[in-house]
Image: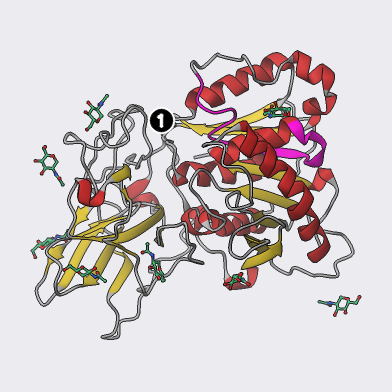
């Protein structure tokens, strides 16, 4: 799928612009595309391009704690990028283990520039000023730097919606070029996140709704990101199915549409006939007024579940032409949002027909086969509906949630629950993995007949 040979510069070229990114089709090795970043800052000593832009690695030199950290200029087919690796959140990128970003060239007059070939994918970026590894720009995750505040987005390529919790990530997408990027051992074609033709696109909206106890964005008001499918008709005779799609730890309602281009992926799923027109709701599980009982605590998950069922679902179903039939409701989430998905599956089983677990279930697991505390034959006997839900588990080879997801899969198997899974062979705990799991969730699982059997996913397979 070569949707675009050339993407125009995303930024204004006018003299007022202080930053830009342009993706150009070159038709040349190593990837067929080159990306140029420009930034203006007359007083900066050093400028890095970072904020989610990571070096590459390959399947022969990656472990859950180590990336080969190839510069993009050294790209070879089969290269991919990883983040959020295990063991040491600051010590896992490259031989020196201290990658924060790519240093831009000083081209004089306060102009900074950097050009590199990039393969297919969705990339977020931001500029880091006068910062090296160290206390001045402490890294929490590879390529992600906590303010203070040498961290700037591209003013001419703003994210869909900024948020108080979120770094400002500007986003660009590079198309797949089979001539230079084809690597049959791994599918690294992310064109399913490119925009479909304008007439086939759904609509992205930021929405506030009433949620008593919420502290943001206003007292008793909470926020969400909403996708209405193309041709959405508020008076349609049949209501639309609804996918509730959760962010993860530290995230916001706008993460999925910004960092994963999730609404482009949904557009492609609908356009390709994999799912019927579907409403997608990206809620936000912070600032709901839930007790701060610690990262991923059961108390938080239980409180968010109760809150969503009491406030979020009724709002969606009374405001939009949204189905309230559990068979037409799905819940999915990534990481901590996947723990929330598991909470919904176990404790709100009949509210949703489909559950997409992307990189998480119960939290860190001690082994790949530790089924203690997960679903079991006993839970299914007490709650038979657990067995006929559309359960999907997706995760990556280098994912910090690997053992958690493996344990969940084994527990489902032992409990006799049919499920589908997507193991992402190049995947880490990061957005490219969750783009892939969302794409496969849509193709193989969403709104498909239940309970799932060994035949369910055979139509949705991708042939590389
Ligand atoms: C420009 O660089 C200076 C450091 O000399 C820094 O303090 C300032 O925040 C930077 N501003 C932008 C918009 O990059
Ligand atoms: C993790 O990083 C810290 C600080 O850089 C270092 O002291 C430690 O040895 C690293 N641990 C591993 C397992 O690499
Ligand atoms: C940096 O500038 C040098 C000299 O002009 C150029 O050869 C090189 O390609 C530039 N590097 C990048 C990454 O743009
Ligand atoms: C990374 O660490 C190496 C070895 O300690 C050092 O030489 C290099 O300057 C560091 N790079 C950055 C960006 O801090
Ligand atoms: C994010 O962008 C907004 C405006 O677009 C700006 O006010 C805010 O300071 C930025 N935040 C960060 C952390 O860069
Ligand atoms: C949501 O509410 C906040 C606080 O009142 C307001 O600033 C923001 O513009 C509202 N957003 C929308 C989409 O209505
Ligand atoms: C839907 O129907 C209501 C009355 O039932 C009408 O007021 C409204 O304009 C219609 N909306 C659209 C989009 O046709
Ligand atoms: C489900 O509810 C029970 C009882 O409140 C609670 O102990 C448990 O943590 C909840 N979540 C899961 C995933 O079991």
Count residues near mark 1 (Cα–Cα under 10 Å), then give few for <14, some for 14-19, many for 20+: many
Relative horizontal placement of residue 58, taking residue 308 as reference (left or right): left
Query: What percent of the width, then of the height, locates residue 284?
Result: 60, 53
Relative horizontal placement of residue 418, taking residue 295 as reference (left or right): right
Q: Which residues are magenta?
A: 347-365
At 59% from the left and 37% from the top, the residue drawn is 338
Residue 359 within the segment the image draws in magenta: yes
Query: What percent of the width, then of the height, locates residue 158?
Result: 42, 69
Single out the residue that lies furthest toward the right.
237
Query: What percent of the width, then of the height, locates residue 135?
Result: 21, 47
Can you say whether 133 is above or below 362 in the image? below
At 77% from the left and 47% from the top, the residue drawn is 309
Relative horizontal placement of residue 174, taking residue 361 as reference (left or right): left
Q: Is residue 116 visible?
A: yes
Secondary structure type for disc 1: loop
What residue is pinned by disc 1?
A: 398
Q: Give the quarter of the image for residue 340.
A: top right
């Amino acid at each position: 799928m070569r949707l675009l040979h050339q993407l125009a510069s995303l930024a204004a070229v006018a003299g007022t612009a202080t930053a830009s990114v342009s993706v150009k089709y070159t038709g040349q090795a190593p990837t067929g595309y080159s990306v140029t970043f420009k930034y203006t800052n007359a007083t900066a000593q050093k400028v890095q391009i970072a904020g989610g832009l990571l070096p590459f690695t390959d399947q022969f030199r990656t472990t859950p704690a180590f990336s080969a950290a190839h510069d993009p200029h050294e790209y070879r087919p089969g290269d991919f990028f990883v983040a959020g690796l295990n063991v040491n959140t600051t010590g896992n990128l490259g031989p020196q283990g201290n990658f924060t970003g790519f240093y831009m060239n000083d081209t004089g007059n306060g102009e900074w520039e950097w050009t590199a070939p990039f393969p297919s994918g969705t990339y977020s970026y931001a500029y880091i000023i006068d910062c090296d590894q160290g206390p001045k720009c402490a890294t929490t995750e590879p390529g992600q730097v906590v303010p203070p505040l040498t961290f700037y987005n591209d003013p001419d390529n703003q994210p869909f919606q900024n948020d108080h919790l979120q770094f400002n990530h500007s986003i660009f997408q590079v198309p797949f070029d089979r001539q230079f990027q084809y690597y049959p051992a791994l599918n690294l074609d992310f064109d399913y996140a490119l925009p479909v033709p304008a007439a086939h696109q759904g609509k992205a909206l930021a929405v506030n709704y009433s949620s008593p106890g919420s502290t943001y964005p206003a007292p008793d008001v909470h926020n969400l990101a909403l996708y209405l499918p193309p041709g959405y008709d508020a008076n349609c005779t049949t209501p639309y199915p609804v996918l509730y799609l959760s962010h993860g730890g530290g995230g916001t309602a706008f993460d999925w549409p910004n960092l994963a281009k999730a609404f482009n992926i949904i557009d492609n799923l609908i356009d390709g006939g994999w799912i019927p027109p579907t409403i997608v709701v990206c809620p936000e599980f912070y600032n709901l007024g839930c007790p701060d009982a610690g990262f991923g605590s059961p108390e938080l998950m239980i409180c968010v579940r109760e809150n969503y069922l009491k406030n979020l679902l009724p709002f969606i179903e009374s405001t939009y032409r949204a189905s309230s039939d559990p068979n037409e409701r799905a819940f999915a989430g990534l990481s901590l949002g996947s723990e929330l998905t598991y909470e919904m599956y176990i404790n709100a089983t009949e509210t949703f027909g489909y559950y997409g677990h992307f990189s998480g279930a119960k939290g860190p697991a001690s082994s790949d086969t530790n089924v203690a505390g997960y679903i079991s034959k006993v839970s299914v006997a007490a709650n038979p509906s657990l067995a006929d839900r559309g359960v999907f588990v997706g995760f990556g080879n280098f994912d910090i949630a690997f053992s958690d997801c493996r344990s969940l899969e084994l527990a489902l198997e032992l409990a006799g629950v049919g499920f589908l899974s997507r193991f992402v062979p190049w995947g880490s705990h990061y957005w490219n993995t969750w783009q892939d799991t969302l794409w496969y969730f849509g193709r193989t699982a969403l709104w498909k007949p239940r309970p799932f059997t060994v035949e369910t996913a055979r139509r949705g397979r991708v042939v590389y």
